[in-house]
Amino acid sequence: MLKALRLPDHWRKPLLGVVLVTLVSVAAFFETWAAIVAIWSRSDTFTHGFLVAPVSLWLIWSRREHYRDLRPAFSVLGLLFIIVSGFGWLIADLVHVAVIQQWAVVGVLVGGFWAALGSHVIAQMLFPIVFLFLMVPFGEAFIPPLMEYTATFVVTLIRLTGMSVYREGLFFTLTSGNWSVVEGCSGLRYLISSLTLGSVYAYLNYSSYKKRTIFITLSFLVPILANGLRAYLIVMIGHFSNMKLAAGVDHIVYGWVFFGMVMFALFYFGSFWHDKDAGAAASTPDLAGDSNLADAATIYKHYWPALTITALCVFIWPFVSHGLSALQAAHVEVPERFSRPSLPDWQPVAAPDWGWEPNFKGVVADAKVYLSDGQTIVGMYFANFGDETQGGELVNSQNYLVPQKHPIWRMLHDDVIAMQWAADKSGDIEEAVLNSKHRSLLVERWYRVGDKNTANAYLAKWWQLLKRLSGDASAELLVVLYTEAPAGDYDLARQKLKQLAVACCH
């Protein structure tokens, strides 16, 4: 017992090094770490983030007898990993991609541990160290495809059972009532929880990397399938109870009970392939006889200078980012060619009473213009996000045209379509159909970075990065064009929108 608690002499400097790189990493990237913790606090989906570091420490502590005889040593590879992660953070900071910044700061922390403890020690602690990346609140980009999958899964099963159902986008109607797939139905919460629990289970119960990989993969895939089945069962409960059950808050309870049953079944079947030696060390401790003990002073002779260099490599990135940001001043206005367009065949008109217009968070400057060619009125909206504060970026998954639970409007269709800007210049734009009780609107939107147009968020971010590295301060805009589609004539509305889009933004 005393031996287990006593810290070996050859571990004292490395553990101090771990504490040092942890403090330096958190201090240097405090804003990013604070953003991570803020998401843990406000989102039930990512509350598990508070437990990731303690679980990682517990996993290491549970095998301390194996680790105590390993020989920590400074690793240059760890230092290089810090540099690569720091550069990744810099790039993400310049274009305001929060999730990449968060992956990068965890990478810097892991690189610090790698540098302080050495490659061999980190290899022995590989899973608990890599597990730290689950602190990052990732997965929001999966929500739209997961919602689409859930809606398709449910409607397909309903039709296979011989029941009639009418679907419009994420909304579908049965004879008993109306249903819609909202963000909470995407299953992301189940997916993240399953992946986290499944990873720990695989580490504790399997010694084979092949078995671990298979089980973790199943922990990712099974909840996706199970969430579709969960949604179908809830719809069926609501349908056969005449919407008295599972149509309110109670369906959340049913969902978590079902998720618990799925996880129990997954762990139960996984136990049939349990490795008896899963708790044992995967390889032999790094012992080299008494000569290593005698050479301890030589091993750590340059340890503190190396850690000082490591700390500098951590701290340098926020200063570089600040310096690059100071070199350019963002264009925070909407250029006059958009705010006051002068286009042949199109004349300014008063705003029609459609009851909807674009509205996004974090907009620094915008312009709303309504034009008519004598037959059709088209609304044009240009939004400039300036220096892009956290949560108010040009490219942001939260820039909704219509919130899901809007009391009047709902989105029936959202897709990417081809766009011919000029004879030698093509691209794509996003097209959506918004519907209310009184009218339907066809909406097209895209990003305009400098003089380039695209609906691809990744391409837009890449153009932003190139533009900012070059010091170009030209405007970066989110462009939205919209018009009414009387009697559902979307072809004519689409033709008018494309015509005006080419005229103003080619």
Image: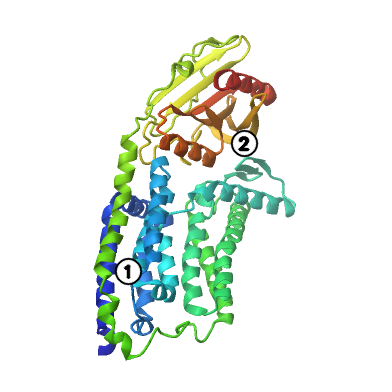
Q: Residue at x 29, y 46 (%)?
A: 319
Between 308 and 489, the one nearer to me in the picture: 308
Up the image or down, 193 lies above or below 41; here it is below
Graded by Cα atoms within 10 Å as few (under 14), some (14 to 19) or many (20 or more), the crowding at tag 2 reads: some
Up the image or down, 438 lies above or below 323; here it is above
Circle nearer the N terminus (2, 1): 1
Residue that numbered label 2 is attached to: 416
Residue that numbered label 1 is attached to: 116
Q: Looking at the picture, how far across and down is residue 380, in whole percent?
A: 51, 21
Residue 175 at least partly seen: yes
Helix, strand or loop under label 1:
helix
Q: Residue at x 32, y 88 (%)?
A: 291
Between 304 and 171, the one nearer to me in the picture: 304
Helix, strand or loop under label 2:
strand
| 303 horizontally vs 82: left or right | left
Q: Residue at x 45, y 71 (%)?
A: 127
Residue type at mark 1 is Ala
Q: Looking at the picture, how far across and down is residue 33, in whole percent?
A: 32, 53
Q: Looking at the picture, how far across and down is residue 315, in whole percent?
A: 28, 53
Q: Is mark 2 in CB contact (under 8 Å) with mark 1?
A: no
Up the image or down, 210 lies above or below 342; here it is below
Residue 405 at least partly seen: no
Between 168 and 223, the one nearer to me in the picture: 223
Residue type at mark 2 is Val
| 122 horizontally vs 424: left or right | left
Up the image or down, 278 lies above or below 409; here it is below
Graded by Cα atoms within 10 Å as few (under 14), some (14 to 19) or many (20 or more), the crowding at tag 1 reads: many
How many marks do you count on the picture? 2
